[in-house]
Image (spheres, helix red, strand yellow):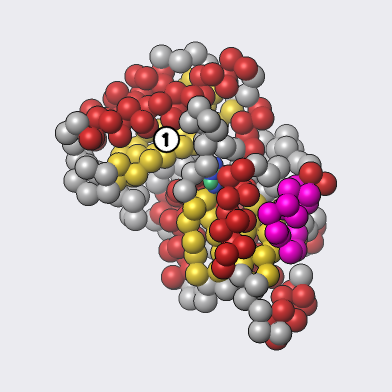
Amino acid sequence: MQQESTRLLQAGKTIAFVPTMGYLHEGHLALMREGRKHGDVLVISIFVNPTQFGPAEDLQAYPRDLDRDVSLAESVGVDIVFAPEPEAMYEKAYQTYVDLEVLSGYLCGPSRPSHFRGVASVVTKLFNIVKPHIAIFGEKDYQQLTIIRRMVQDLNFDIRIIGVPIVREPDGLAMSSRNTYLSEDERHSALSLFQSLKQAEESVAKGTRDAKQLIHAASELILSSPHTKIDYVSVCDPETLEDVDRVEGPTLMALAVWVGKTRLIDNVILKP
Ligand code: AMP
């Protein structure tokens, strides 16, 4: 991949890059369509990165289907699928990590303590391998996007980061490879994530500004669905991710909820 990227750069090509963990859905494909607009060559990676999974998380169970992914990628104009084996990415003596001191601690940080260290490190490696001019990430993983933007700024990566809005199922559920874990009953309960965010949006439109009130209403709605357990519901600054008391400017409302054994995330930008 590195040799191919060097060759492309020497030929004066612009490289756009979409990192993924595969099991592609319309959310991923939206990122690829965006990437197609920005690069002469569109590269995606498919890599279920072990270092971003905690010891009790779903690394082994994570869904994989490389053949299907490759044909979906082809259908939206991807030129190169980079799908390394874990052993090629992490030698036995591997020991270098990128850690963001503050942003990694909020939202998903407390329940996934080394997750963002794994993400920042693998994205750094992928950037060094693929050598893109532009990289595209989804707002679905809002904290991840914030962290990548900060990291690119902090470490002087000469890469433009583009964020793409969340792609949803017709009923509002944010698309995710992990949705395949849900039973029919759980799938129904999972809709409460989107519904609670929509309710908050409507409430802000009607004049509510108090963060605690919004969080309380969202939590109540979610917990009224069976199989749900809240990890967090947060109303925070969309850049620093620090909690806010009131919704004055554009404000991030983000949440993580267990539905049965599946942990789902979703978010919205509240605009008073
Ligand atoms: P993943 O394969 O889950 O690591 O996701 C790869 C990229 O796709 C990340 O930048 C995600 O934020 C993005 N992504 C995943 N699901 C969605 C979605 N429903 N809408 C928009 N982007 C998404």
Q: Amino acid at mark 1?
A: Leu
Report the magenta residues as a range: 69-81
Q: Name the side, left or right, on which 175 lies relative to 208.
A: right
Horizontal relation, residue 34 to residue 5: left or right: left
Question: What SS does tag 1 mark?
Answer: strand
Determine whether 87 is above or below 156 in the image: above
Q: Residue 260 occupies which quadrant of the picture?
A: top right
Residue 67 in sight from this viewpoint: yes
Left or right relative to 1: residue 245: left
Q: Is residue 71 magenta?
A: yes
When the figure is inspected, residue 142 is found, relative to residue 100, above or below; the finding is: above
Residue 136, magenta (yes or no): no
What count of labels does the image hold? 1
Residue visible at 37% across and 19% down in the picture: 221
Considering the image in quadrants, where does the C terminus appear?
top left
Taking depth in this image into account, of 163 and 239 the one nearest to the observer is: 163
Q: Position of residue 57 (x, y in %)?
A: 63, 36
Depicted 204 relative to depicted 126: above or below? above
Residue located beneath label 1 in the image: 255
* Above or below 217: residue 96: below
Front residue of 86 and 137: 137
Ligand 1 is within 8 Å of the C-beta of the residue at disc 1: no
The N terminus - image quarter? bottom right
Q: Is residue 97 visible?
A: no
Residue at position x 49%, y 24% from top? 191
Q: Nearer the viewer, residue 232 or 199?
A: 199
Q: Residues within 10 Å of mark 1 (few under 14, many from 20)?
A: many
Name the residue rendered at 65%, 72% in the picture.
40
> Horizontal and vertical percent for residue 228?
49, 20
Q: Which x, y percent locates residue 203?
A: 24, 30
